[in-house]
Image (cartoon, rainbow, N blue to C red):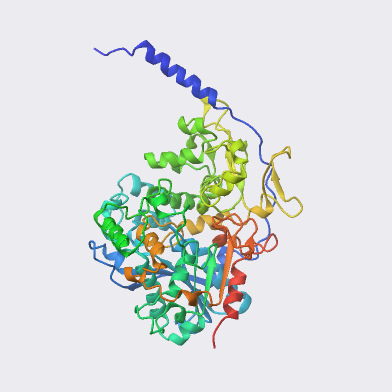
Amino acid sequence: MRKSTPLYLFILGFACVLLTAGCYMPGGPVPEGKHPPAVRDWTAQDVDALVSMEMESIYSPAPRENGVPPEACDYINFLRFRPKGSSGDPADADAILVLMPGFMGGANSLEYTGRQLVYMALTQDSKYMEVWVMDRRPNNLEDLTGSNAAEAAGDVQVALDYYYHGAEIGGRTFQGFLDDGDMPFLSEFGLKLAMEDVYEVITTMVPDPAMRRSKVFVGGHSLGGPLTAYFAGWDFDGDPATLDDAGYMNCAGLVGLDTALVPTLPTEDLSLSMFFGLPTIADAEDYGQVVEGMRDGTYARRVPLPLVFPEFLSLQETLAMEAAWHPDAESTVLRRIPKSPEVDMVLRMLQSRAMDQFLLPVPYMTDFRFTNEAQLGIIVDDNYQPVVALQASCGFLNGGAVVVKEFPLPEDLQEIPELTEALRSLISIKGMFIANDAGPDYFHLGQGPLYSWADFDEVADAADPDYTDTGGTLTYTTAEEEVSDIQDVARFLYYGPTNALEWYFALRVNLDMEVAATSFGPDCGLPYLHPDAVGGMPQVTFVAEKGPFIPPETTETLKGYNHLDVCVAAANCSARRENEVIRPTIDFMLANLGD
């Protein structure tokens, strides 16, 4: 006999429904209409017609002190951008730029920079330049079978079936995202390996030392800036008396993209212990103990960040494909997958107006109707994505109510300058907005307007630089604050054989960077022996006004740029605004070529 449900449970459930319904108050100001898009100087198709992108590999066995990594990790991979029809011999290039991605960044994070720089040098300067972008060894651990097959088929369902529904592709099925226990060898993928990989690429591709000193430039984005400084000061045979192998003797200059070209040392406020649970390192003995702790699993091997984890990084590639292929169609990807607790947490964070909605997520992300472009936009744009290191400025929502976001901090706390400044390198707490119409009421969710995306050049123009609500009382963003095309952002997230986001960033890199520039660094096997040579090298650095770094007073910032904009700000829209990174980088390289 079936038991009846107690009356008090019905009453409790009904009370919860009423409480939830009372929290949801749709409506609010609606953004103005889109502006006509600006004229493009050239298209992505124009660039692809003249610039090739290939994945190059060099065999170099990975460390085996703590287990044998998969065979794929025995190869150094890098994306190579060069003019189509060129000889393929780097010796024929006028200049070569070798770039290192930032924290948790893959080679594709600099895909836009690479292809645009080669194209502009070729068409505007008649110069044959190449750009090589490194993929760190942990990138080789990623199972990109599903996303690459989806890209080849032009159908994201291929990826969803592979990653979520057990589908087989080429005799392979997805075995799940890896955790620390699956990757003991990651404890050995540190700064030394990263430096040696760059050196191996440069010396293999350009065997003539004089040629390297003449036309090879080394640079990086974000964390890639300190890595660039370490490379320049590194001694690759460990003997400071022999200088031919020193990093600074193997390149002509340095390039920094929203970074500083100096080693990053810990401070009292920004220590590894604070973020990743590592103890303070005072000497070589402490360092050795922490390394052993990584090896035996006492300490994490992969950077443990709760909101930046492999599944969601992979999911962004799928969302980017849909945004590129079907920009104006209603997004359904998030409705077609099971929500892990981690993904659920991120979706709540992104689409909660205030704390009550975060705790009792009604309406939920999937209750709103977004086009594919808009769905990607609210994950990467600086007015919706609060994590500063993940932000680009690529437009704004359009087509429905958009209100000020008060999560994770209420609006009154957002006005405290000291709090804003303290958090500026980590999260944005001002200028954040959120869609606020998932339907007319709690009982009709999913019936709201279809939110679309106003691209960076559709929110404002010179004659009308503010993007406001229809009443003109609330300014959402301005022309100066929007510089990247949402389609370029989508492309660099998924296009080609690799990706823009590093699923398994090795914490050993951060540990080694903390130690390498100390007096005991060489005793730890980290031969950063030529720090004084770094500052004397030709170098150029670009710093985003709204990025995570506080630049020196003497450094001019890129107005309106966010952290990712330095890599993807539109280069082909001079009628609206020139890209302020690529042309100066080309000019810098041409001005510092050797004889």
From the viewer's perspective, is 495 left or right of 32?
left
Percent across and percent down for residue 391 are 54, 52
**Image height check: is 178 above or below 443?**
below
Quadrant in the picture for the N terminus: top left
Q: Residue at x 77, y 53 (%)?
A: 463
From the viewer's side, name the closer residue of 102 and 55.
102
Q: Name the one closer to the observer, 275 or 404.
A: 275
When asked about the image quadrant of residue 47, the answer is bottom right
- Which residue corresponds to the image point at 38% horizontal and 12% vertical from the top-left? 8
Residue sitting at x 72%, y 53%: 461
Residue 245, percent across and down? Answer: 39, 81
367 vs 284, left or right, is: right
- In the rendered image, residue 215, in percent from the top left (x then y), is placed at 51, 81
Q: Residue furthest right?
A: 463
Is 431 located above or below residue 548 in the figure?
above
Looking at the rendered image, the quarter that the C terminus falls into is bottom right
State which quadrant residue 75 falls in: bottom left
Taking the spot 56% from the left edge, 50% from the top edge, the residue there is: 424
Q: Position of residue 59 (x, y in %)?
A: 31, 73
Res. 84 visible in picture: no
